[in-house]
């Protein structure tokens, strides 16, 4: 970790089990992130934001939902929106299954919301890639409690005059800040289940929709 970056502590059951780093802009030309050597640190682990399992403090057996994202920054952004989230951070689905994390998510939350990045790899996780292409592994894993949140594809002009394209939840937060979307309006925009696919809202769909159902 010779280059400057944000270091994330991956906590599980109150213990720090793993560290990962996201390199700062200007130092990320060669790669965006750094994970410890698996020989030393073991397999890559997911990152949970600070609201994971927060429903227990409120006296609820289950939380309403948790969002699954690709990177740590998106998990932090969901936390800023008041939502628990888990970032995959390169963790394999095999590890998530064998470690018991998938069963834990089912036991802890009423709904699992997978947020796709607005790019081909992000979409492929929903439909399946490689040997799993067309098998919809997320739906097979979580069944009817799965929702798919599709990040909108559009650009806006930032205060510095440069165009910025939305590709993930962190970009949505930047868009909110630049366009001065009020705090109480943000969740209405994020959770607009009836949003058109070409709108500027995060499109939320039942997993069955992705499988060709209603």
Image (cartoon, rainbow, N blue to C red):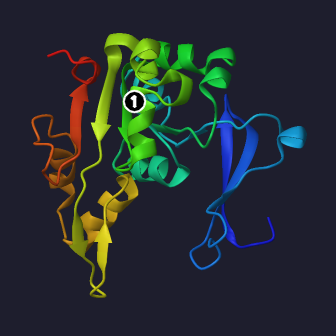
Image quadrant occupied by the N terminus? bottom right
Q: Residue 111 in the image: state x and y as whole percent.
A: 34, 21
Relative placement, left or right, of 170 versus 1 is left
Total numbered badges shown on the rendered structure: 1
Tell me: residue 126, above or below residue 166: above
Tell me which corner region of the image, top left, top right, bottom left or bottom right, holds residue 131: top right
Q: For this rendering, which residue is in front, 140 or 183? A: 140
Please tell me which residue is depicted at 15% across the width and 43% down the height of the picture.
197
Tell me which corner region of the image, top left, top right, bottom left or bottom right, holds residue 18: top right
Please tell me which residue is depicted at 38% across the width and 50% down the height of the picture.
119
Please tell me which residue is depicted at 27% across the width and 79% down the height of the picture.
158
Relative placement, left or right, of 112 versus 156 is right
Please tell me which residue is depicted at 62% across the width and 17% down the height of the picture.
97
Q: Residue 108 in the image: state x and y as whole percent.
A: 47, 18
Q: Secondary structure at mark 1?
A: helix
Q: Which residue is mark 1?
A: 126
Farthest residue, direction right: 40
Tell me which corner region of the image, top left, top right, bottom left or bottom right, holds residue 26: bottom right
Q: Residue 106 in the image: state x and y as whole percent.
A: 46, 15
Tell me: residue 71, above or below residue 212: below
Label 1 crowd (10 A; few <14 / some 14-19 / many >=20): many
Q: Residue 22 in the image: state x and y as whole percent.
A: 63, 61
Image quadrant occupied by the C terminus? top left
């Amino acid at each position: 970790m010779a280059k400057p970056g944000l270091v994330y502590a991956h906590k599980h059951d109150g213990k720090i089990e793993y560290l990962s780093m996201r390199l700062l802009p200007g130092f990320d030309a060669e790669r965006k992130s750094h994970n410890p050597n698996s020989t030393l640190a073991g397999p890559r682990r997911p990152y949970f934001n600070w609201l994971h399992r927060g429903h227990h403090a409120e006296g609820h057996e289950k939380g309403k939902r948790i969002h699954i994202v690709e990177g740590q920054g998106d998990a932090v952004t969901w936390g800023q929106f008041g939502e628990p989230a888990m970032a995959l951070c390169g963790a394999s689905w095999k590890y998530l299954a064998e470690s018991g994390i998938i069963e834990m998510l089912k036991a802890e939350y009423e709904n699992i919301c997978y947020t796709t990045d607005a790019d081909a790899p992000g979409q492929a996780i929903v439909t399946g890639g490689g040997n799993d292409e067309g098998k919809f592994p997320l739906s097979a894993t979580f069944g009817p409690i799965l929702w798919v949140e599709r990040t909108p594809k559009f650009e806006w002009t930032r205060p510095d005059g440069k165009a910025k394209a939305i590709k993930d939840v962190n970009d949505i937060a930047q868009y909110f800040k630049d366009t001065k979307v009020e705090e109480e309006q943000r969740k209405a925009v994020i959770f607009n289940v009836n949003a058109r696919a070409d709108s500027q809202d995060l499109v939320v769909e039942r997993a069955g929709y992705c499988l060709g159902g209603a």
